[in-house]
Image (cartoon, coloured by chain):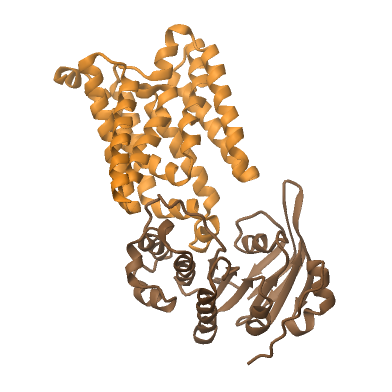
Amino acid sequence: MVSFISSNYFYFLLAIMVGAVSGLVGSFAVMKRLALASDPISHIALPGLGVAFLFSFNPIIGAAAALLIGAVLIWGLERRMGATTESVIGVVFSLALAVGTLITPSEDIINALFGSYGQISLNEFLLGALVSLGIFVFLLSKRRQMMLAILSPELASTAGVNADRYNLYFLLAMVLTIVLGLKYLGALLMGSLIIIPAVVSRNITRSFSSMILAGIIMSVLSVIAGILIAQSRGFAIGPTIISVAGFLFVVSLLFSSKRK
Amino acid sequence: MLEVSDLSVSFNELKVLEHVSFTLESGDILAIIGPNGSGKTVLLRALLETVPYEGEIKWAKDVKIGYVPQKLYIDPSLPITLKEFLESKLKLIGKPKEDLGGLLKLVNLPPAVLTRSLGQLSGGHFQRALIAFALIGSPQVILFDEPTAGVDSSGEEQIYNTLHRLRDERGITMIIVSHDLSLVFNYTNKVLCLNKQQICFGSPEEALTPEKLRELYGAPVKHYHHLHG
């Protein structure tokens, strides 16, 4: 176990950073009652991954492009249609999953869907760390704007916050986070790392600041425990991380039923 | 304070507000009345620039606006405390030192509710919390969307008293969306009748003729006329 960490230092360290960002992004996603939408949003990455594998360019670039297009599309739909976007989003996500699965070469499909181990180069690590830190600092410093924009665009406007703009910022932060986590959890499971730890945190906290903090802790905990368990038992990495998060969720239910 | 000319709003080609024009002077209390779905709330949202519109909305320079929504659904399981909610605006508008205690007293909220989560406040407490949020930063004008909807009659009385105090002590200009015609005659000096289009605008005594009310609501409405006291 120790030898895995020391020989895959960048892989492990970036995983922790991705976990922290996921927990933070997830708190806002849960607030937006986007839980159902943001879980499958990561599916949009799959067609991008598939195209990248087919034409042998960097899969992360393909995924990032697909996700950015998806995010802007969702933002546009939300603005035009309001609450009725959910069904459209559901259709788009399922379609992305289906098409992505069809075009991804069969030897790559499992890793694309569920994540994988692997070496991460110094450059990849530095870029990933920089993006993680950027999202993290941005969301933390803009948490009040984000909160008001989510609760009510009108109240936000009386505090000088343009809710429309913050909705777009949030979606971009979310898709970048998904891109960061694809290596570890794949297109099928990355959305779950954003949602589950944040829901766990919502169940056990009583204030917004503690919800954010606990969301980050729960997510990082899931990632570390998931990687260590998967390594020592020879399990697939993405499913193990999500199983740990799911276990924390069940525990949090006991906790919250005691509280109320 | 505010000049609105030929304002129209439509969503996906559906016109929800057409050709609305009115003016508001400092110290005015304007009531907006009209049946359900007549565009009253949309008008407030346009005044806050959160919906796209055609026409012109001209606020006085550097005016500070407060807003009290009719209802705001907050998931009861969401852990956002009242303190965090109010402090978010204090910090965003750069007044982190403004006194929350005094604000709560003004709207008759006990300090103990600060640590409660928004979704678990009672309807009356939440309504007053929204008024407190609106008052942060000392706005010159506050928009109220049905301030007494969903509040029992004693709560209603308290909210009217609060509105009264705001007008008398702080000279705040108000726009109040309401169904309550007695409020219109007792508290306001201007009224705007909406039914997607503008039916009337002026002082309540002059603008609210029985004919206009019939045109507005489609059926005869009992005319609650109280003298100003």
In the shown orientation, is residue B203 left or right of residue B161? right
Query: Between A23 and B21, which is closer to the camera in this rendering?
Result: A23
Please state the total of marks drawn on the protein image: 0
Is residue A134 visible to the viewer in this orientation of the structure? no
**Residue shown at 75% from the left, 71% from the top:** B193
Q: Inspect this view and state whether residue A121 appears.
A: yes
Q: Quadrant of the N terminus of chain B?
A: bottom right
Q: Colour of chain B?
A: brown
User: Farthest residue toward the left?
Assistant: A2
Can you name the residue that lies furthest to the right here?
B211
Residue B97 location (% of width, % of height): 34, 71
The image quarter containing residue B140 is bottom right
Q: Name the residue nearer the viewer: B118 or B170.
A: B118
Chain in orange colour: A
Quadrant where the C terminus of chain B sits is bottom right
Residue at the farthest top position: A107
Which residue is painted at 55% across and 24% down in the image? A94
Counting from the top left corner in percent of width and height, residue A77 is at: 62, 39
- Going 76% across and 61% down the picture, which residue do you hit? B196
- Whether A215 is drawn above or below B115: the answer is above
Q: Where does the image place residue A236, in percent across and percent down from the top left?
A: 31, 16
State the image coordinates of residue A142 (x, y, percent, origin top left).
40, 51
Q: Residue at x 32, y 68 (%)?
A: B112
Residue B18, quarter of picture: bottom right
